[in-house]
Image (tube, rainbow, N blue to C red):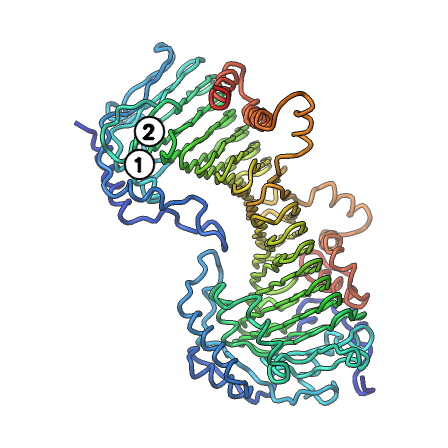
Amino acid sequence: MASETIELIRRMGREGVKRLEYQKFGDSPTVKYYTKWDLYSKYLEDPGICTSVGLIVKSDVEKVGIWKFSSHEDLYPIGKLIRPDESKIVASHYAALRDALVVEIRDNTDVEIRVGDGLGSSSIHSRHIILVTKKRIKANVTIDATNYENDALETLFIEGYLGKKSKLNLLILNNPPENTPSINIFRFALDDGADLKYGYLGSGGYMHHQNDLFLLGERAKVISGAAFVSGPKQKIDYVGSVVHEGPRGESHITSQGVIFGDGYGVARGLARVTRSGDWSKTVFEAGVILMDEGGKGYASPMLEIDTGNVLEARHEAREARFGLEQLFYLATRGFNKDEARYLLTYGILLNQVSHLDGELLEYADGFIRDMFFK
Amino acid sequence: MTEAVKTTDIEEILKYTSVDELYGWEWEYAKEIEIRGRITRDIIEEISRVKKEPDWMLRLRLRALDLFYRLPMPRWLTGIEEIDLEELAAYVKPKAERTEEWTDLPEEIRKAYEKLGIPEIEARFLSGLTAVYGSETVYSKMKEKLEEQGVIIMPIEDAVQKYPDLIKRYFARIFPPSDHKFAALHVALWSGGAFVYVPKGVKVEQPIEAFFFIGGSLEGQFEHTLVVADEGSYVHFIEGCSAPLLKRYSFHDGMVELYAARNAHIKFTTLQNWSRDIINFNNKRGIAKEGAVIEWTEGSIGSKITYTYPSTILAGRGAKTSNIVIGIANGPYLKDTGSKVIHAAPETASRIVSKSISNNGGISVYRGLVRINKGAYNSIANVECDSLILDESSLAYTYPHNQVEEPTATVSHEAKTGRLSEEQLFYMASRGLDEGEAKSLIVIGMLKEILSDLPLEFVSILNRVIQLEFSEVGGVG
């Protein structure tokens, strides 16, 4: 029997799908939405309920606690960082959710989480992780969402909590099948002195990806690098944001898109320093490269500074062409145009996650090679 | 200028010791016509009748009115709840015949311009001047030499009558009323403003100015400026705005349209110094054809709330634009400014520079869009935003959007938000400057890009205005 909390949140989700809008506000006075929400609407009509949590975890059982949320629902909250009444699309995730998986890292270790199949015939495949890193723990976590195949709206939500002075290296790989729509929302709260190194590589399908990092404690620190490849017919909207709530925090957020053919890609996000985030430092970079004619690449790095006591706050956006100089350089070394393009893309993607520790970087390298050179 | 007009105004302005003294409190002025109430077809028809407009202009106004009621309220606007359009006068005609002599104006109107040194600046530095008070142009004059060159400078109402073909071709076409609710409201209610036409190859050496004054509370001002620069011509247009301190608020919803034909060059400078009782909306857009240049320079100093985003459509090969926007949000007021550029032709170039200063709880917002359409080969865009926050209670937000659909284009955007550091203040204190003086000095430093192109007298007045703005926290002079 499902827990009361899951029942309640599912009910809120179903009501929200009917009542809520995809976004409360348009993206700007001239841009209504960057995500093509109409691509998702047909999946929301009658989502049904998934038959499993759809996640496989590989870890050291001595160091990591893993359980379904419904079995110990009083230990950690669900829907607190990602609220079911936030938007239509968030509500749809909760409407179809069978259960969430709680992963509690209690000692220094590595964890691998794979997104699996077997969620039944519902039109939304909801996977939900509550990821907790206890205080003073150092962990490497890989979330691999590259090996699944479904004809449904794929949603992956992560509510993450980093305890005091914990260190988390997190790599997320995302490659839904062709023509598969997906929604990823990852939201992390960092306590005093917590340190998150975050890397994201994504490609494929129609994707709305949102990564929000809340630096709640004092001197919390984040380095986040994300890269995505939007191929022909693909549409990717990547939103990476950081909010400094605690004082003396540091964040460096970069998002980079590479667009092939008539692909569509958006690299955007918000860096915010609130009044309580005095003496924080935030650097935010977003860029998109168009490799071919017919592509569309948009960048929108936003900055909201609510205090005069800010150590550093800046952002940069770059939309650059695939340079003739780079092509010429590689051609002189014997690479043809296609090889040169892929080699450059490989370099861009790997560079975005180069801040991660060795094993995760190797994992990312393997993913990029598989994606482009198999 | 006749001898009856004082010529020592600028020196007097420099002696003012407070912002209140500079603006003065609102004073009574005689009105010939005032139209208030819900904005309906009847009101539009009445305004059109008063202006003796041709039918085509009335039809345009009525289409815009229809759009105003059908278009949604922009959801990103804040602080406009106070605007009650039924309470505002949609049209105010002061009791004054339009003239080419300052001495002909009623004293209560003339003193508004004298107080700001406008007659003196006109005599020394301008090719022509249009002065709007409330909803109507009360003074308009152009230097004879320009008339010989075929330059047209006149109130836009006169141009509707005399040059209907030119007006029909450009008016509300560069910035159509369908763009948003307040553009529609403007086109429905427009009144007052200037029309400038510069013939092929003519370079207008001295700037032309339009000066807009709102004289009372609960007035709406919907002035319209249209500048058409024909092939290879050059013109510099300066727009100034001011108002006294009011008992209530007033609302300005103006529009500027620029058309730069092949290889023409238009410079458009705005010195917005509304008093803090004015809610200021401004709709500004230019079209630059092949090889043309449009330069917007916006100094947004006064007002309670300002929403303004000068925009350029680069519609011809090799067209260029430079948009410099400088906003001072000396709180608790809001400056929502920015810029928009559409690259719609190959080898076009744009540069946007936004500088904002937030002080005393003020909010500065930069909102920008750079769009490079498919086919705009080898276009280049560069955006720089600098925000300076002078105290703990002020805010600075930056919302850029860069949209590229052409792989040979390059767009770069950099923004930073910083604070006035203890070291800077200490350095200035060690040279005998107090906090207010130090802040005004920093602001004047940031404004140098707009000040460099202006006559010295303008610069002196602006410097004084800024010193007075910041003297409230520190004391100047």
Question: Which x, y percent locates residue B462?
Answer: 74, 64
Dots 1 and 2: beta carbons under 8 Å?
yes
CA gap, disc 1 to disc 2?
Answer: 9 Å
Q: Amino acid at mark 1?
A: His
Disc 1: CA contacts within 10 A as few (<14), some (14-19) or many (>=20): many
User: Relative to B452, is A6 above or below?
Assistant: above
User: Relative to B41, is A342 above or below?
Assistant: above
Identify the chain of the residue marked 1, using the numbered disc in the image: A
Q: Residue furthest left?
A: A1
Using the image as rendered, state which of residue B65 and residue A306 is in the foreground.
B65
Secondary structure beneath dot 1 equals: helix
Which residue lies at the image location 78% right of the left edge and 71% below the top edge?
B202
Which residue lies at the image location 68% right of the left edge and 69% below the top edge?
B239
Q: Is residue A7 left or right of residue A264?
A: left
Residue of label 2: A128
Q: Is residue B146 left or right of residue B287?
A: right
Q: Is residue B208 left or right of residue B332?
A: right
Residue of label 1: A93
Res. B368 in view? yes
Which badge, 1 or 2, is on the more N-terminal residue? 1
